[in-house]
Amino acid sequence: MKVENPPLTVALLAGGKSSRMGKDKAFLKFNEKTFIQIIYEELKDFDEILLSVKKENLEKYAFLPVKKISDEKVDAGPLEGIKTSLMESKNELVFITACDMPFIKKELPLSLLDFYSSDYDAYVPVLKGRTEPLCAIYKKSILPLVENHLQKADYKLSILLDDIKVKYIQMEKTSLSEKIFSNINTEEDYEKLNGPCIFSVSGFKKSGKTSLILSLQNELSLRGYTFSVIKHDGHDCFTDAEGTDTFRFSQAGALSTCVFSDRRYAFFASESVTVDTLIEKTKKLSTLPDFIIIEGMKNAPFPKVEVLRKDVSCESCCKKEEHICFVSDFAFSSEDNIPSFDFSDVKKITDTILNYFHKGLEK
């Protein structure tokens, strides 16, 4: 269904150099789709879709059923893309977005439209004090100002914003996820995007962490996802079993022992290790898991499913900004409207985890 009232043009900017990435970001893949496909499919129901690309790259985008436009001035950055988008738009309002934002959601331009008023020339999100001019709405009427800035070689968008009437919209006051604004600019960013999704199931001892992880593993397996599990034990009460050969080797002074077969191995060493080291070892497995689930580590900076049990603790022990959701055996609600589920709601918990990491609800 077309989004109306007022009509909105969406302009996808794909004419950049991708210099930090070293290759065309629009054709990077996430969940088996290119960034440009993901963004187009999310925003395609608006009144008009434009794609701003370099002239020499027009053929590369022939598969997209949108109007293609190209920059007249080279090396002018996104300001040139904004200019051509405003020129070609059939609507007064144009939502500009970059091709390196695979988490963009149609709710963002719809949310910006809620603030529409004839008093402003642009509607720009602000996240944690940082303006986001490349996922903002601009009026076609500012085109002469944009052209003037290009003629003067004032290519910075911040300079343009200083010259027009801008409605700055604090995103913290909306229900939108800050991940919408994530840019994938470097190889490191891209590796994190396509690497395993890492989260911890945290809570006090005997709150039900292990049982919940087993339930989540079963549900993830049913949906076709793979996973590895890292367990933190604060009491150092694990070892190779007494009486085994590896135990005897350790008792005799071996610095480390390892036992292996054609299908698996176990390694034991008496030295300290960090969870980050274990995560890196997991990433080097011949088969990379979709998820790395960490049991415990309530004070570590991972996204968390926090477990609460009324016989153990009824209060959160984790930082609120790290929560994915709560799981409890009593009616619990957080002050920050973080989702809360019963232990039996495994499907909903799994849905929430997958949504958090922008995975499809079914693989």
Image (cartoon, grey):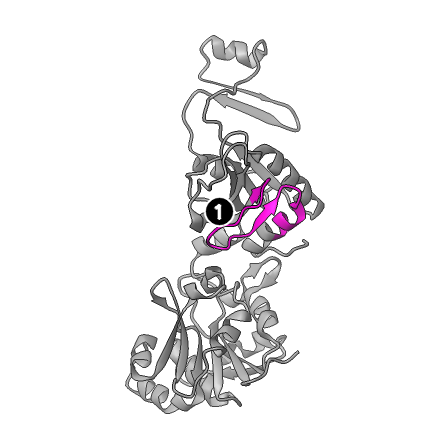
Tell me, yes or no, if residue 182 can be seen here: yes
Residue 155 position within the rendered picture, expressed as x and y whole percent measured from the top left: 32, 78
Q: Residue at x 46, y 23 (%)?
A: 235
Position of the N terminus by quadrant: bottom right
Residue 343 position within the rendered picture, expressed as x and y whole percent measured from the top left: 63, 41
Residue 156 is inside the magenta segment: no
Q: Residue at x 58, y 38 (%)?
A: 228
Q: Which residues are magenta?
A: 327-351
Element marked by disc 1: loop
Residue 237 position within the rendered picture, expressed as x and y whole percent measured from the top left: 50, 20
Image-based side of 225 in relation to 271, left or right: right
Q: In front here: 118 or 341?
A: 341
Q: Is residue 240 above or below residue 175?
A: above
Residue 357 position within the rendered picture, expressed as x and y whole percent measured from the top left: 55, 53
Tell me, yes or no, if residue 357 can be seen here: no
Q: Residue at x 42, y 73 (%)?
A: 134
Residue 289: quarter of image: top right
Q: What amino acid is labelled 1 in the image?
A: Pro
Can you identify the residue that label 1 sits on? 303
